[in-house]
Amino acid sequence: QYQIVQHTPTDVEFRYVPAGEPGAEDIAGLTAYMRGKLHPSIAVRITAMTAIPRSAGGKYEDYLSLVPPPGAAGPNPRQLRDDVAARA
């Protein structure tokens, strides 16, 4: 299971549930893969989790953007990230 979360326009997190204990090679490989798919200016974080949290409606989302649309006064992405992490 995995989930890609965009926290800011330049910060992306790849969350995944490992089948076993993740090794340094696994983390390095995932980081390199994600950096190869995204613009070089994007910061990539890899986070191993015991479970991927579901939305308030109970749905599993592969991709989640916490970035409000341009010009919109949206929620604080850091607060949303903390709220999601607290539910995990």
Image (cartoon, rainbow, N blue to C red):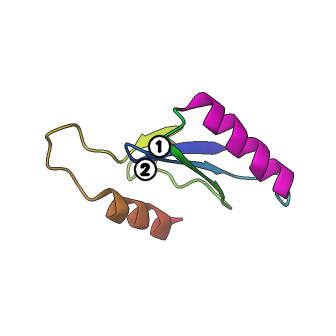
Residue hosting label 2:
55
Q: Measuring 39% from the left and 65% from the top, which residue is drawn there?
A: 83
Q: Is residue 88 left or right of residue 7?
A: right
Q: Measuring 77% from the left and 49% from the top, which residue is drawn there?
A: 28
Label of residue 85 in the image: none
Asked whether disc 2 touches disc 1, contact meaning CB atoms under 8 Å apart, the reply is yes
| Residue 87 rendering spot, x and y as whole percentages | 47, 66
Q: Is residue 20 left or right of residue 43?
A: right
Residues rendered magenta in the picture? 23-38
Q: Considering only vertical position in the picture, is 41 above or below 56?
A: above
Q: Main secondary structure of the magenta part?
A: helix
Q: Measuring 25% from the left and 44% from the top, which residue is drawn there?
A: 68
In the image, 27 versus 75, the foreground residue is 27
Q: Is residue 60 left or right of residue 32?
A: left
Q: Which part of the image, by quadrant, shows the N terminus?
A: top right
Q: Is residue 67 magenta?
A: no
Image-quadrant location for residue 34: top right
Tell me if mark 2 has few (under 14), some (14-19) or many (20+) residues whose alpha carbon lies within 10 angstroms of its own.
few
Tag 2: amino acid: Ser
| Residue 22 rendering spot, x and y as whole percentages | 82, 57
Q: Secondary structure at mark 2?
A: loop
Q: Considering only vertical position in the picture, is 4 above or below 79?
A: above
Q: CA distance from mark 2 to mark 1?
A: 5 Å
| Residue 13 rendering spot, x and y as whole percentages | 54, 50
Q: How many marks?
A: 2
Q: Which part of the image, by quadrant, shows the C terminus?
A: bottom right
Q: Secondary structure at mark 1?
A: loop
| Residue 61 rendering spot, x and y as whole percentages | 49, 40
Q: Is residue 67 left or right of residue 44?
A: left
Residue hosting label 1:
59
Q: Is residue 30 magenta?
A: yes
Q: Residue furthest top?
A: 37
